[in-house]
Amino acid sequence: MIRGYTFDYQEVDAKADARLMRSLFSNQDGRLAGGEVSIAGLAGLRIDVCDFLMCGRHIALDEPIIAPTTQLQSGATHARVKVVLDLSITPANEFTQCQIVVEGAESKNGFIELVKQDINHDGTKYELEIALLALDSTRHISEVIRFWELITPSKSSISALTNSFAQSRLEVNTLSNTVANITTSLNTKADVTDIHALQSTIAQIQAQINTLLNE
């Protein structure tokens, strides 16, 4: 069976779309825009409005949120704020497959490894760290040790697009020169058959130029 995704009247499967996004961003996770973090007084970590990618899945925070740390267990010296995607949760009109979770540990290396299942194939769970925090004795934030990266499309993808455009322009210039040469030759021809043949060649080349310019 052949399936088309980027065609009229065809459905775009979420997993297929995410695989494409993951490829374009070289398998990176993180912020596309916004999402700066700051210490929100005694409340916890503030995460600003943002769009971000997790395993190619596009998610947005439509309003700032506060991730509290004071409810963590006694003895926690560090906190990790993470996003958890759980596709085992049944989809609904209200998006519930994504949660912001705050967890504590007694050292910055005391957290269990993030779950990184391939949710675009057979996996159901994927986690992304937003920030790693140091806490004081009352479990308020004393320092933001690290926070999530701002990501951009793959440099190799950008380079490939740039090279492709440059190659297309070179081909257009070459074909335009060919048209100019044929036109000059056309002006010197008296035979009707020759003229028609050259006019046909010009039309074919012009079609190639139009195709290149519209790619």
Image: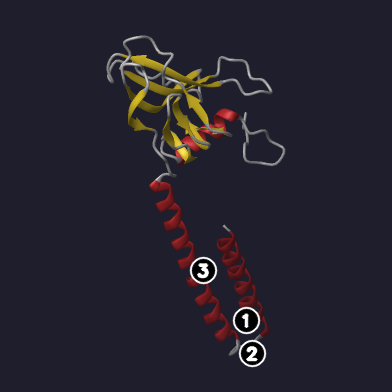
Provide residue 181's location: percent of width, then percent of height. Answer: 52, 81
Q: Which mark is residue 83?
A: none
Task: Determine which residue is flagged by label 1.
Answer: 194
Residue 112 visible in the shown view: no
Percent of width and height locating residue 108: 28, 20
Tag 1, which secondary structure? helix
**Which residue: 38% across, 28% down?**
131
Question: From the viewer's perspective, is the residue at label 1 or at label 3 nearer?
Answer: 3
Q: Which sits in the foreground, 47 or 202?
A: 47
In the displayed structure, 33 sits above or below 84; it is below
Circle 3 SS class: helix
Viewer-closest of 97 and 3: 97
The quarter of the displayed image where residue 146 is located:
top left
Q: Amino acid at mark 2?
A: Ala
x and y, in percent, of residue 188 in the image:
58, 90
Report how far apart the C-alphas of labels 2 and 3 lie in the structure: 29 Å
Q: Residue at x 52, y 29 (%)?
A: 65
The answer to whether 214 is drawn above or below residue 122 in the figure is below
Element carrying mark 2:
loop
Colouring scheme applied when the structure was drawn: secondary structure
Q: Return the residue at label 3.
A: 172
Q: Looking at the picture, which amino acid does disc 3 mark? A: Val
Graded by Cα atoms within 10 Å as few (under 14), some (14 to 19) or many (20 or more), the crowding at tag 2 reads few
Label drawn at residue 190: 2
